[in-house]
Amino acid sequence: MAVLRAAKKDLRRLIRQKLSQGTLLSLPEYHAAKRIGIYLSMPKGELATGPIVTEALRQGKEVYVPYIHKAAATPSEASTSVMDMVSLHTKEDFEGLEADPWGIPTPSEPSIAGRKRCLGKRAFDPQTLEDVREGMQHLDIIVMPGMAFDRRLARLGHGKGYYDSFLSRYEQGLGASTDSEIGLALEEQVPPEGTEVPEGPYDWRLDALVIGDQPILRR
């Protein structure tokens, strides 16, 4: 009986994942998007995004995925890990990504030079005597992971602050945020009505949250 219950639980989870994936692919924001950013999922604990990435590439959309790297140290700041989003070339490129220590498919460091980077690269502006970013890529939507989401569209991440920091740097560089930040969640990741995700001043809220085949939550 225990084996049967486990098998049924796994099947229910798989169906809920497929419902969420299908709902995202049906969103008008997704259909209108030419360039999307999307997280690549861990083996467990997150809604799988592989099928979404594959379908977006098949449809000819530009797909950008996370790349964690060390930011260059400055006189006032020590080197720290930050996130950018970098382009995928093809389905084969995506399928060839190697897993990092958490099991997440990740572009290799040697491959980055041949990819577009959402945050571009730093350059020096001789007129303003300031660092600027060249070659930044606008994202039409970004699909974000989380451990939990509430019905106000607040998001609880994994504690590193990569996405909140990325969105802040993106907004500073382009002078605007992405057109739409969308969360993907399983029902278990959304606490009961009245339970709220704690928020700080640097936490970003979503524009929309997809939960299986439930009505889409929007601002």
Image: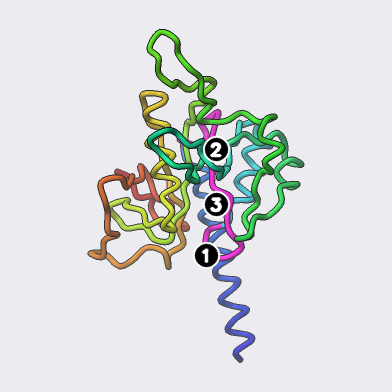
Look at the picture and state if 175 lies above or below 26.
Answer: above
Label 3, on which residue? 21
Kind of element beneath mark 3: helix
Label 2, on which residue? 85
For marks 3 and 2, give the one nearer the viewer.
2
Look at the picture and state if 169 lies above or below 133.
Answer: below
Residue 112 figure quarter: top right
For marks 1 and 2, give the one nearer the viewer.
2
Earlier-in-chain disc, 1 versus 2: 1
Q: Which residues are magenta?
A: 28-47
In the displayed image of the protein, which residue is found farthest to the top? Answer: 127
Kind of element beneath mark 1: loop
Which disc, if any, is residue 45? 1
Residue 125 figure quarter: top left
Q: Residues within 10 Å of mark 1 (few under 14, many from 20)?
A: few
Earlier-in-chain disc, 3 versus 2: 3
Image x and y of residue 151, in percent = 30, 56
Q: Residues within 10 Å of mark 3 (few under 14, many from 20)?
A: many
